Amino acid sequence: MASDRLSARLGPIELRSPLIAASGTVGSVWEWTEVADVSPFGAAVAKSVAPVEWPGRPAPRLAPAGPGMLNGIGIQNPGIEVWVEKMTPVLPTLKIPVWGSVVGETPDEFAMVAKGLLSAGVPVVEVNLSCPNLDDGRMFSLDAARAAEVVAAVAATADVPVGAKLSPNADDVVGVAAACLAAGATFLTLTNTLLGFGVDLETARPLLNGGVGGYSGPGLKPVSLRCVYEVASALPGTPIVGCGGVTTGADVVEYLLAGASAVALGTVLLAEPRAGTRIVRELGRELDRRGVTLDALVGGVIPW
Ligand SMILES: Cc1cc2nc3c(=O)[nH]c(=O)nc-3n(C[C@H](O)[C@H](O)[C@H](O)COP(=O)(O)O)c2cc1C
């Protein structure tokens, strides 16, 4: 489905398509491959995995909110040991490269989980520094030094490309990005969800049991795009996966122009698991209309 002209390059990583399925929105990937054609995608990122099983937060943990949704899943996952046992035989059977995603509470925990993911055969590790639903307080990606410590620990363990997934809530996303790159990140994923909150007007309770959660979907797009634009402008040549609110091929073009080399789809896949087929078709039409290659779009925004 993804033709040669849609092949993309994210630093040293070659992708058959610039579309990537975002972590947490396609399960451990195999479930999604049973309902969707994965050929429009260059890769899919599995749900983040922690050192031990995390049960996640109690329901309700998903809620529509304006032009997007709130989630407070809390990284429900089986722990790295079970993940490796289940996924090692499955990964080679899937028709898409599956990237691993690590989460933890200390740099050593991140490194330990990355080691497990590599033993299962993932070709790329994404470091989730930006989950808003952890109870231990602040996200690593709000602080350049803490984020860099985690990236360095994972990069020292991994002989594959390592991506740092950052938060749109950081005061200084460029500073955090620069620190992660200096610590060994191969690419950046910009961004995870934005901290959000909503109230059920009938019950006066928060929409999510956990109260504050992560906001995603179309309402997030201008914020994530701003992060991509700021980082690409300040650190030219940085390999970036744009992520936040993409629902159309035109959205993908916008991320490429802002400086992303690849674009991840999240919330749209929850509502429309086969959205990749439509979006890759729309992207092809956008390229035809402009008479350009994908490469030519990357960072092509023209200043006033
Ligand atoms: C239900 C749900 C679960 C998510 N779980 C994870 C996760 O485990 N790890 C992660 O890095 N991001 C996770 N995310 C964030 C998405 O990967 C993505 O960064 C975010 O939703 C923004 O993209 P979107 O607007 O296209 O959804 C999750 C998002 C949602 C909606």
Image: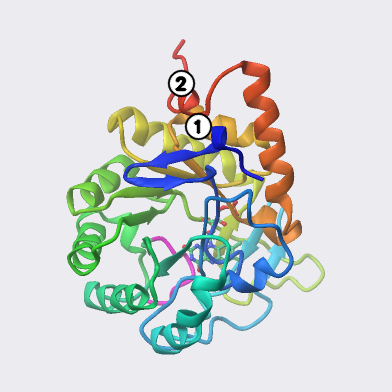
Majority secondary structure of magenta residues: loop
Residues shaded magenta: 130-136
Q: In terms of image quadrants, where is residue 121?
A: bottom left
Residue 228: where, in percent of width, then height?
43, 37
For the residue pair 137 and 202, the one nearer the viewer reads as: 137
Quadrant placement of the N terminus: top right
- Label 2: which secondary element: loop
Q: Which color mode does the image show? A: rainbow
Which residue in the structure is indicated by mark 2?
300
Which residue is at 46% across, 71% downward?
A: 48
Alpha carbon distance from label 1 to label 2: 8 Å
Residue 279: where, in percent of width, then height?
69, 42
Q: Earlier in the sequence, mark 1 or mark 2?
A: 1
- Which amino acid type is shown beneath numbered disc 1? Leu
Residue 44: where, in percent of width, then height?
53, 59
Which residue is at 20% across, 67% downward?
A: 153
Q: In terms of image quadrants, where is residue 272?
A: bottom right
Residue 216 appears anywhere in the view: yes
Numbered marks: total? 2
Crowd rating for badge 1 (residues with CA inside 10 Å; few <14, some 14–19, many 20+): many
Above-or-below relation of 76 to 287: below
For the residue pair 125 and 89, the one nearer the viewer reads as: 89
For the residue pair 205 and 40, the one nearer the viewer reads as: 40
In the drawing, what numbered circle is on residue 162? none
Q: In terms of image quadrants, where is residue 299?
A: top left
- Label 1: which secondary element: helix
- Which amino acid type is shown beneath numbered disc 2? Gly
- Quadrant in which ligand 1 is drawn: bottom right
Q: Are marks 1 and 2 in contact (CB under 8 Å)?
A: yes
Which residue in the structure is indicated by mark 1?
256
